[in-house]
Image (cartoon, grey):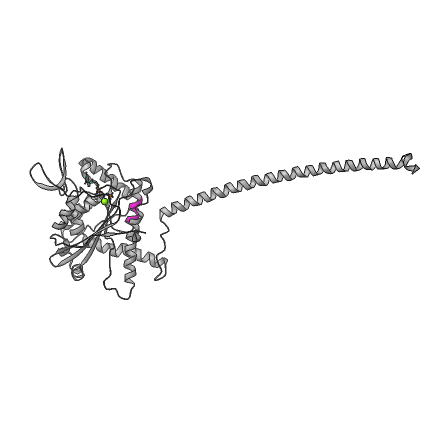
Amino acid sequence: MAAASPVETAPAAPISSIGTGIANLPNQRHKIVAKNGANFTLMVCGESGLGKTTFVNTLFTTGIKDQKNLNKRKVKQPAKTVQIQITKAELEEKMFKVKLTVIDTPGFGDYVNNRHAWIPIVDFIDDQHEKYMRQEQQPSRKGIVDMRVHACLYFIKPTGHSLNPLDVEVMKRLGSRVNLIPVIAKADTLTPSDLAKFKQSIRDVISAQNIRVYSCPIESDDESSTKRNHNIMNALPFSVIGSTQDVTTPDGRTVKGREYSWGVAEVENEEHCDFKKLRSLLIRTHMLDLISTSEDVHYENYRQSQMETRKFGDPRSQPSENPKFKEEEELLRKKFTEQVKAEEQRFRMWEQQLLAERDRLHKELESQNDKIKELQSELDAYYYSQRDSPKTIRK
Ligand SMILES: Nc1nc2c(ncn2[C@@H]2O[C@H](COP(=O)(O)OP(=O)(O)OP(=O)(O)O)[C@@H](O)[C@H]2O)c(=O)[nH]1
Ligand SMILES: [Mg+2]
């Protein structure tokens, strides 16, 4: 279970930021959020080495202004993530506060035995729903700790082909639990035309496989928002470039980006990738929609399915669909059946040997009987011949 695995929590950093969209929220929601403050939890996951940790660092260094953290993060390249890592920050805009939690997860699928390494991630999401539900059932519901995931970025390898079967399997499971946002990693490794083709083929697989991904409401009261929403949705899956390095462009600008002999791939350039669109969707324009759909749809689904399958207060049953256990169970069953078959075969041969031995003994017994009879009759003949002989008469 993911809950049992150690989780590293970075200390909360009070961060003030201009630019979160909380002040622009629709009025009614605005009041609720203003009163309670908002919790926003973002998770990143996907295969190993795709730049998840780099993305999180990039987000912190470009979107959230925290000078102390920024220096620390800039110094070293991220090492391979080996456990779920939680970073907390506070965003503040005007009077509104958002507690941002970013969950970085270990990559999966890079070697054969790691095929099921995504299970702890799915379990982590379920566990947060479970913990929240349990707290909700308590008499006192003050100070509820809430780490339900509001958006899950799924990193896709920039192969230029399509989604692989592991992507499809994981995305299906994630999409039914959280707002799933597909992201193409390392967009700087694809040419613009390859990227466009790649995006289309991913969209095709998502719809053919019925993978549920986050889609924001398009229509809005004002035209510019509607246009912006269209723009955002058309860019899906978002391509990203991650970098915390400052580099200088040929025209002399200093930007976050990656330097190549042919030029600079800029993180915040809309011509190069969709990082800006994605960041804006997450921490500006659609944060509230992500929070409310998580609560109204995903958490509600979880709550209802749990209520239907167990009594109030009962612990959560082991997820029966856990494919790792299923595979192991299947293997054991196969082994068991094979062993039973082999034993049966052995018994059948043994039985046949016994039957053959019994027949042989029967036959031997019969021949022995025949011999005895023969001898008996010989003996009888001898006896009569002796009895009738003159010697016997003389006696
Ligand atoms: N070309 C390119 N390389 C990148 C990008 N983002 C990250 N990288 C590089 O990819 C390597 C892996 O990056 P990480 O951020 O550690 O990847 P990760 O997904 O967190 O890996 P795990 O923790 O093993 O799951 C590093 O060498 C990064 O510098 C990108 O946008 N483009
Ligand atoms: Mg990592």
Magenta stretch: helix, strand or loop mostly: helix
Q: Name the residue at 28% across, 41% down.
A: 205
Is residue 388 found left or right of 195 in the rendered image?
A: right
Please state which of residues 240 and 368 is positioned toward the viewer in this rendering: 368
Q: Is 138 drawn above or below residue 2 in the view shown?
A: below
- Looking at this view, name the residue that lies furthest to the top: 261
Work out which quarter of the rendered image holds the C terminus and state it: top right
Query: How far across and down, in percent of the image, does residue 254 sit?
Result: 8, 41
Query: How far across and down, in percent of the image, does residue 280 sit?
Result: 15, 49
- Looking at this view, name the residue that lies furthest to the front: 395
Rendering quarter of residue 199: top left
In magenta stretch: residue 175: yes
Please report the bounds of the magenta region as a residue range.
169-176
In magenta stretch: residue 103: no
Is residue 22 found left or right of 328 in the rendered image?
A: left
Rendering quarter of residue 274: top left
Rendering quarter of residue 154: top left
Q: Name the residue at 12% across, 59% down.
A: 95
Query: How far across and down, in percent of the image, does residue 383 sit?
Result: 84, 37
Label total for image? 0
Query: How far across and down, in percent of the image, does residue 33 sit?
Result: 17, 59
